[in-house]
Image: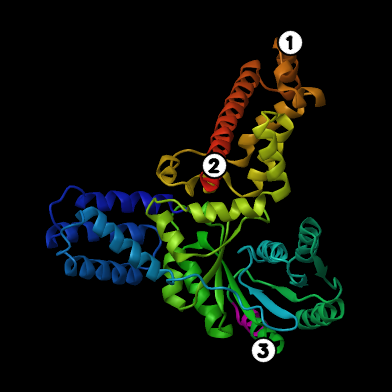
Amino acid sequence: MFESLSSRLDKAMKTLKGQGSITEVNVATTIKEIRKALVDADVNYKVAKDITDEIKDEAMDRQVLIAVKPGELFTKIVYDRLVDLMGGEQKSINLKGEPAVIMIAGLNGAGKTTFTGKLASYLKRQGKVVLMAACDVYRPAAMEQLRVLGEQIGVDVYLEPENKNPLSIAQNAINQAKATGKKIVIVDTAGRLTLDDALMREIAELKSALKPAETLFVVDSMTGQDAVTTAKAFNEKIDFDGVVLTKLDGDSRGGAALSIRREVNKPIKFISTGEKMEAIDLFYPDRMAQRILGFGDVLSLVDRAQRAFDEEEAKRISQKIRQNQLNFNDFLSQLQQIKKMGNIKDLMGMIPGMNKAMQDIEIDDDSFKPIEAIIHSMTKYEREHPDILDTSRRKRIAKGSGTTVQQVNNLIKQFEQLRKMLKQVSSMDMQKMQQQQQGKRR
């Protein structure tokens, strides 16, 4: 996400590094490079020009702040402008109503149905009782896709396969929600391959009749400036409440995220990466600006970890670490939890400094498959007692997992190093707790 833009902005702002002061000459050079970087990242030219003009004006107004190095000051100015461009602050969705109705709109291929499932899963984790309504009556298998997602996340789905009237299905779903105590109904509407009058009329009629508490427009970020054009057209017809950007993990430019807020004057409320139901995040303009500038996004990483990791499981693992009893069953369990957090490269990009380091490295979820195969090729007793893994057992495990003995050896070595490190960290934490308790008693 944003790898190309981040790299270009970093290169552009290096112009000011080591300069004694901010001047019209070095600012002009840097501004020119930033504008080119934004346009190349698919940011609308007018938007790119406006924001760089604002950066230039502010940089020249604040040249008197000689206590701050020019590069650092300029980075702060760019950061502030990016945050402002993307909306300034995080905006929540409206859940008023009995039940609250959320309507999902957008073109085919934008990821509406997948996002419907992700949003339902997100709300369920917050303790909400949700019903999904399958109102895409045109796309083959759309209803079946939503039904499968519902089973996967444990959320009920209302569908009428023979009914071709989306408004009727939605109204029946709302009645079903009232009768069964569901507090939220998410309506997955139909899309089209292109904008057309029939699509717009149907969406407008649905919104008029359902009066949803929240209408979210889902847009594929990989479509670049077309995303902004589509958003404008939908907004003119249905006056949606917020934008959802999908497939951000597949676009290193990310210009849509920077353009769409200013062009339609509607907040971006969620971002979605990948197909996993857990891969959904609230949109925080400040956090996104940090990622664009290569500062990482630790807060979002923590949010994902808290959603993915089971609290009781974490306590159990913590206890085993303190007793130095961590085994390969525990290791495999934690690996599965990490995979739930989303695309691995995207997660690495949230760590400060890693976005630049990972730019030319391809990492996908298949990277874990050899590790999983090795662990699954161990017997139950071997997984529980890693210390017994001698040479003959390692050869058998390598053959059974389709890997090499060297790969098995490397995994076991890394596991032992991890176990020692975690034991040391745990011991240090225990010592600190004991010192704090002794201090209180004094």
Extreme residue toward the front, this view: 442
Helix, strand, or loop for circle 2? helix
Gap in angstroms between the C-alphas marked 3 and 2: 66 Å
Q: Residue at x 50, y 68 (%)?
A: 227
Question: Local crowd at mark 1 within 10 Å, few (<14), some, or many (≥20)?
Answer: few
Q: Name the side, left or right, on which 24 lies relative to 210.
A: left
Indicate how the structure is coloured in the image.
rainbow
Helix, strand, or loop for circle 1? helix
Extreme residue toward the bottom, this view: 208
Q: Which mark is nearer the camera, 1 or 3?
A: 1
Q: Quadrant of residue 210?
A: bottom right
Question: Local crowd at mark 3 within 10 Å, few (<14), some, or many (≥20)?
Answer: few
Badge 1 is on which residue? Answer: 392
Badge 3 is on which residue? Answer: 208
Q: What stretch is highlighted in magenta?
A: 196-202
Helix, strand, or loop for circle 3? helix
Gap in angstroms between the C-alphas marked 2 and 1: 50 Å
Q: Which of marks 3 and 2 is nearer the N terminus?
A: 3
Was residue 132 drawn as part of the magenta stretch in this picture?
Answer: no
Badge 2 is on which residue? Answer: 438
| Residue kind at label 3, given as amino acid type | Ser
- Between 330 and 87, the one nearer to me in the picture: 330
Is residue 233 in view? Answer: yes
Q: Is residue 139 above or below residue 360?
A: below
Across and down, in percent, residue 23 comes to 13, 60
Extreme residue toward the top, this view: 392
| Residue kind at label 1, given as amino acid type | Ser
Disc on res. 173: none
Q: In this view, does 344 lie above or below 74?
A: above
Is residue 275 in view? Answer: no
Dot 2 and dot 1 residues touching (CB under 8 Å): no
Across and down, in percent, residue 417 comes to 57, 25
